[in-house]
Image: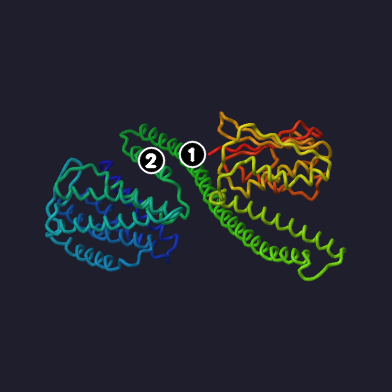
Amino acid sequence: MSIYIILTLISGILTLLLGLFVLGKNRKLRLNQVFFFFALSCTIWLLGSFMMLKSKTDEEAIFWDRIVYIGVVFIPTLSYHISLLFTKTRNRKYLLFAGYFLSSLFFILSRTDYFVTDLYKYSWGFHTQARFFHHIFLIFFIVYFVLFFLNVYRFYRKTKAVERSQAAYFLLASFLMFLSSLAFLSAYGINLPPFSYFTAVVFVFILTLAITRYHLFGIRVILTELLVGGMGLIWLVFSFLMPTVNLRILTFLTFFLFCIFGYYLIKATHEEEKRREEAERMAVQERALRLRTERLTRARDQFILSSQHYFRTPLTSIIGFLEMVLDESYGKLPEKVKEKLGLTSRSVLELRKRIEESLDISQFQIRKGKGILSLEEVRVEDLIKNVIEELKPQAKEKNLYLEVSFPENPLPKMKLDKKRMFMVFVNLIDNGIKHTLKGGIKLFLEYLKDKNSILFSVKDTGIGIPREELPFIGQMPFERGRKAKELTPLGKGIGLYLSRLVVEAHGGKLWAESEGIGKGSVFYIELPVK
């Protein structure tokens, strides 16, 4: 008995065992039930082929080949039925009913000489020869094989994660199904090695994995399992075919060692694939978390913007009303009341300023500065002169000098958001005044020809900034130097943070330098001339 015949027997037994295994997993599941009948059809094909190949007479071989077709005629329809159940497709029942009807019809026709007859013998075996209805059956087989493939491929394209992996197994199985179908060539007098009988059991094995395993490994694992299983099967068959007892024992020992090696190879491949899938799962979770965080951030930002607008509107009304009361539009006020209302008005103005700063920060963070700026041509010298006029009284009140040094030649006009840059210059100079106890503040403005930019600096003789704190100044709200917090505990660093956002939105940069505590500090703004 040749090795080809033994492989056919082993393939048939394994196919039946796989069908029983899937059915045992869940007998009530329709997919498992249909798969069992599919495996049973393949088993009839393989075991019938085994009996045919070992037949002693032509009549016996033809008898068993007709038995083969009892299983073969139902394989295309059952394959298509499995694909419908797997992909949960419910609108193709008419094709399914047509398939079962045609399979039943071909089952009846296969009993006659109009389907197969006579016997073709070749180098390793023999096969009955195709007649008219066999040609029709071959077309039917190809059509339902293509339907099986297209159904699974469409499902593969639109799904992800585990179901996508299962569909990939089905697509690999469809390729092996094509190889198995080449067994039909023998019916047309074409002599091929019987590899199709072995690929049939591999095809069933892959479908078994796809149906029964909830978490599937990649294609590399299945190929490793197939390689080890195939080689092990070959060594096992060789151990029975060796001519002497010594060679059989040696071959069986080799088979045993190969099984040990194969076990550890498959185990290592599984572990590696598990790590990869775990990494992919964590990546998916991370993406989902990032999307959720982005949605929450947008909701938070929208809430802040809405809240700030709602706060600013009534504050504007309060400020307008207080101004009218202080102007005595509603009658003369006692001095004490007027003084208290003046304090209230200044507090409300300060509150509105903070709200506007917070609103600006939110807008810059959400829109990254784009579309926020209202640009117009401005002379920076004029803008700074207006700032100085506004802040002179504060410097004079603390007996501080406030000096400015402009270049002799006029600076080029720049396109700036006049209102926001005015606020930036106010913040820097005002910070200098607040954090300087004696001495004063010097302002410098110069044109950097090599960079085509304007450099503005505010140098004070104040409390200074420790070197280790310099990189964090202006980087986040509420991030201020330790000495600054001691001197002005109510300040929150919001103005400086907003100033940096505004400057960067203009394409410039803002930074600070200091020699240390008690040695003053210098704040710089560099803006490109556009």
Q: Looking at the image, which residue is at 26% across and 41% down?
A: 2
Residue 227's tag is: 2
Q: How is the image coloured?
A: rainbow
Find disc 1 in the rendering and name its residue.
Answer: 264
Residue 329's tag is: none
In front: 333, or 523? 333
Q: Callout 2, which amino acid?
A: Leu
Q: Is residue 470 visible?
A: no
In front: 21, or 471? 471
In front: 272, or 364? 364
In front: 211, or 18? 211
Percent position of residue 428, x then y: 71, 42
Percent position of residue 451, x then y: 56, 31
Q: Say which element carries label 1.
A: helix
Q: Looking at the image, which residue is at 53% across and 39% down?
A: 530
Question: Upstream in the sequence, badge 2 or badge 1?
Answer: 2
Percent position of residue 414, x then y: 56, 41
- In the drawing, does residue 380 fall left or right of residue 135? right
Q: Say which element carries label 2.
A: helix
